[in-house]
Structures are given as C-alpha cells and as structure tokens.
Image (cartoon, helix red, strand yellow):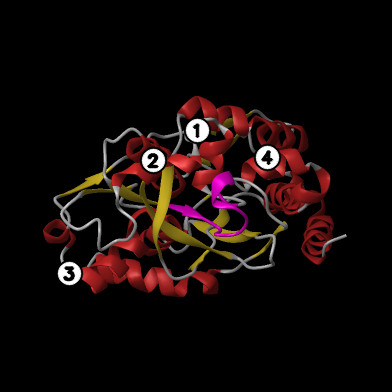
Amino acid sequence: MKPLLLSLIASTALAGTAMAQDAITGFNIGILGGENAQDRMTSNECFRVKIEEALGVPVKIFTPADYDGVVQGMLGGTIDFAGLGASAYAKIYLNNPEAVEPVLTKQNIDGSTGYYAIGFARTDSGITSMEDAKGKSFAFADPNSTSGYLVPGAELMDAYGPLDAYFSDVKMSGGHEQSIVGVANGDFDAAVSWADGLGDWEDGYNSGAFRKAADAGLVDMNNIVEIWRSKLIPEGPFVIRKALPDDVRAKVIAITDTMWQDDPTCAYALSHGDALDLVPVTHDAYLGIIAARKLQEGM
C-alpha cells in the first residue's frame, strides 16, 4: 500500500467521531477546457462514480468552456476537486493561497513528472521549424494554460521578440483540442499544444492533448508535424479545496492516488493517456510557474 494512502487512512481514523459531524451534501469535480464538454463528461464518468460511491453524496462534473471557469469555481468554492495545469494553479494561489492544496501529479512512463509545449503545423504546409512559421497565423490555447500559453509565449518571445510582430496573426483557439483540430483543418498555420514527448509522434506520444485527439479520431498525427519544443514543464497538480472536511479530502485523495493500480482504464482518462502512476506533489513544485505568472501579470 502506498505511503500516502497509509497516512491518509491513519489521519482519517484519528479524526474520529468529531470529523464525521462535518457532513457535505454534494461534491463537484471540475474538468479544464480543451476538449468538448460531452467528451470530458464521458471520459471522467468512471472517476465521478468512484467518488460518489466513496462519499455517499451526489457528485457532479463541471465542464466550463474555458480554464478560468474551473479557476473561478475553485476560488468561489463551487468546485471541490480538479486536475489543473501549473499556470491555472498559480492563478488560484496568487488570488487566494488558502483556496486549494496540490496533492497529486502524473508520473510518466519514464518516471519523470514533466511535459512539453509542442509547436506543430500541417505536414503539407512546408513549415518544419518555428523560423518557417514567421509571418504565419499562430494559435495558443487559453490565457490560463501553462503549455498552451504561459511557457511557450514566454520562450517564443525571448527567442523572436513580440509575437504579434513575428506572426501575422496570434489567436486564442479556446483549448488544446481546438488548436489541434484548427491546424489540421487549416484554420491556423501553426499552434502549440502539449505532450509528454515519450513514445511515438504517430500515436500522439504516450500522453497529452495530441494523444487524446488521436484516440478520439479527431486528427491523423501523420497530417501534422512537430516544429518546436519547449523546456520541460512541471506536470500540473490535482488539487482539492482546503476547506473540505478532512475525511472527505482523505477519501478523494486515496481513490485518486491508487487509480493506476485499481482501474488503469479510468486512470488513462485522468492522465490523458499512458502514465506510470499518480504521485504526491506539493506547492514547492510550482514556485517557478508562480513566479512566471506574477511577472506576466505585473504583480
């Protein structure tokens, strides 16, 4: 049994009768934008059912149209648990350090806990590098996305200067899925999305937005090509509201913590593809992203 799970069980047992008095009447899970709402609901239904069975109260999934919907839901207390990108977590923390706690993150097949922003274009576009994309239209995903805006935006600006001068047009697609489909359909000349960078490009790598889009049949990876890769980005955290009763927090974290052992199919959906495990993470893993977010917002 995992050390994290053992400690959670122990702390819950020690809480005793007093903790049982802190009842909840429902529990809400937030799923970031980036794919259509129905797909998000369907792929996370297995997780919703497990949490509902464990808590004994109705559990709902919320699929806001953009990242900020989940961010504001967690800040306002209407969403209790979510898997976030590092930048979205940074925004919550900078607005209210006591709102949520990062508890788990994805561990890749090779044992790493990071991923990449990947620049890409259509294979038949003649664009094979970011230099080739100069003067072309370019799409980011969402202003609150780590790999879809914060990190690639900063790195590309450092390398090429103001992006609205380097590219002919800079757009926010609305999400990673929209960026991938948009490039494949010719709506944008190039864009960025995310992947663990492991495995084969033809499969969408092992995990990430490309893998989800390929699995869903939304894109043939042979029709798009990687043209750029960021530095390694820390995997985003699964976070839970600090104000929840300790026994509720313990149950939800324990179920998520052992998902790859207990139900690999459900874990595949949570992890956006193949992974080794979900492992503990703390606030300190995101200090660099928080600093970058503060700089971006002029704080």
Amino acid type of the residue tagged 1 in the rendering: Phe
Whole-number angstrom distance, CA of label 1 to CA of label 2: 9 Å
Eye-nearest disc, 4 or 1: 1
Which of the two discs, 1 and 2, labels the residue nearer the N terminus? 1
Say whether residue 81 is visible. Answer: no
- Mark 2: few, some, or many residues within 10 Å (few <14, many ≥20)? some
- As drawn, the label of residue 69 is 2
Q: What residue range appears in magenta?
A: 193-205
Give the labeled residue for mark 3: 161
Q: Marks 2 and 1: in contact by CB < 8 Å? A: yes
Q: Marks 1 and 3: in contact by CB < 8 Å? A: no
Whole-number angstrom distance, CA of label 4 to CA of label 3: 53 Å
Q: Which residue is drawn at 64% across and 38% down?
A: 24
Element marked by disc 3: loop
Eye-nearest disc, 2 or 4: 2
- Mark 3: few, some, or many residues within 10 Å (few <14, many ≥20)? few
Q: Does the magenta stretch include residue 200?
A: yes
Give the labeled residue for mark 4: 23
